[in-house]
Image (spheres, grey):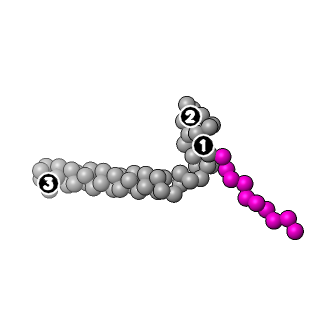
Amino acid sequence: MTVQTTFISFCVFVFCFFIVLLFILLGWYLVWRFFLQRFGFIRELYASENSNSQDVPKRRRDKSRKD
């Protein structure tokens, strides 16, 4: 293997690594945006210190049957 071949192989590896990382981050963002954001527990885990508690909507209480 020449130096040029080794360099090209390294560049391809780094490029593929960044593409995979991009897809993972994009997938995480989409899952967060469309699914996980609905759950208060998950929002509280990622809440910043500057956020107000008023920004988080109150949880609805389920009506329980009284028989």
Q: Taking 14 as reference, is 49 above or below it?
A: above
Q: Taking 66 as reference, is 9 above or below it?
A: above
How many angstroms separate mark 2 from mark 3 (CA)? Answer: 52 Å
Which residue is tagged 1? Answer: 56
Secondary structure of the residue carrying tag 3 is helix
Badge 1 amino acid? Val
Q: Is residue 32 left or right of residue 12?
A: right
Q: Residues within 10 Å of mark 1 (few under 14, many from 20)?
A: few
Badge 2 amino acid? Ser
Q: How many marks?
A: 3
Badge 3 amino acid? Thr
How many angstroms separate mark 3 from mark 1 (CA)? Answer: 55 Å
- Is residue 66 magenta-colored? yes
- Of 47 and 64, the residue lying toward us: 64
Task: Residue 1 in the image: state x and y as whole percent.
Answer: 14, 56
Q: Which of the 4 image quarters holds residue 45?
A: top right
The region drawn magenta spans 58-67
Q: Which of the 4 image quarters holds residue 65?
A: bottom right
Q: Is residue 6 left or right of residue 21?
A: left
Q: Residues within 10 Å of mark 3 (few under 14, many from 20)?
A: few
Secondary structure of the residue carrying tag 1 is loop
Which residue is tagged 3? Answer: 5
- Of 22 and 3, the residue lying toward us: 22
Is residue 6 at all visible to an observer of this figure? Answer: no
Q: Nearer the viewer, mark 3 or mark 1?
A: 1
Q: Is residue 16 left or right of residue 33?
A: left
Which residue is at a point 59% across and 53% down the rendered structure image?
Answer: 39
- Of 6 and 27, the residue lying toward us: 27
* Farthest-out residue, bottom: 67
Q: Taking 6 as reference, is 44 above or below it?
A: above
Which residue is tagged 2? Answer: 51
Nearest to N terminus: mark 3 or mark 1:
3
